[in-house]
Amino acid sequence: MTTENTQERSEGFRRPVFFRRRKVCPFSGPDAQRIDYKDIRLLQRFLTERGKIIPSRISSVSGKKQRELAAAIKRARFLALLPYEVQ
Amino acid sequence: MKLYECVFVARQDLATSQVETMMSNFTTTITEMGGKIEKTENCGLRQLAYRIRKNKKGHYCIIYFTANGDAVAELERKMRVNEDVLRNLTVTTDKVPTGSSVLSFTKGFRDNRRREEGGYQRSPSGRSMHSSEDGADIEENDMDMSIEVEPKGEAV
């Protein structure tokens, strides 16, 4: 009885948050955009409101590209193109 | 001889002519050490995302050049010594981009932010209702949802 309840509850939680997983990585494919630390408009799509990097399980970026993206964001933060933290 | 891209930020109190002089000083340093300048660009005064040494704005400049490693070391040393340079970053690249840089015509971080509002909308119950194409505004609660431990030991 307890197991059924936990299953139902977790399904209800998970579906709206994670259905995006089936999308393709925006940086792979023939016309993919290059990740440039100077292009803050592109980088900002992968930051939260508070300026935190969105995990790849939500943004559906591939592993390799997520590492490049994170490195680019950190460079942009160093050059004051992006903030480290937004209040 | 590798292709390098150097971005540096000069403090806001300088006039544009002074920034240009600074740039030519750095380019002379590179050519003296046997390097070759591919492209220079002054991207203008931009709003900084956070205050650096009490400056809110800064002059962004980019230099593309091919050189040896010791030229790069010398350039970075000069920039570190120079008090007017707030930040500098030298990176290897594979090609010089054509046209003006992205930094010249994008606005600061704040203006971008206001235009691209919209992501997860939170319903009163705390669950996300819909998500848009650009980035997600995730509250910390959302991310912790999956790791939440289901309370055990319900009264049977």
Image (cartoon, coloured by chain):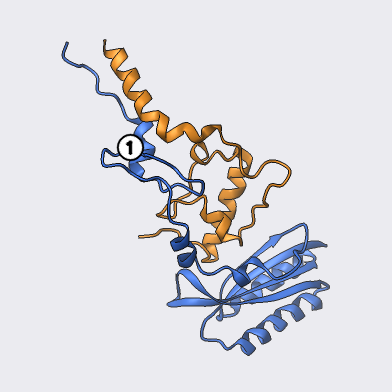
Chain colours: A orange, B blue
Residue B10: horizontal and vertical position, in percent?
57, 78
The answer to whether residue B26 is left or right of residue A20 is: right
Determine whether B122 is above or below A17 in the image: below
The amino acid type of the residue labelled 1 equals Arg
Chain at numbered mark 1: B
Task: Name the element at disc 1.
Answer: loop
The answer to whether residue B86 is left or right of residue B130 is: right
Which residue corresponds to the image point at 26% horizontal and 13% vertical from the top-left?
Answer: A2
Q: Which residue is mark 1?
A: B127
Residue B152: quarter of image: top left
Which residue corresponds to the image point at 44% horizontal and 55% vertical from the top-left?
Answer: A51
Residue located farthest toward the left when viewing the structure as drawn: B155
Residue B65: horizontal and vertical position, in percent?
77, 69
Which residue corresponds to the image point at 69% horizontal and 75% vertical from the top-left?
Answer: B41
Residue B101: horizontal and vertical position, in percent?
67, 68
Q: Quadrant of the C terminus of chain B?
A: top left
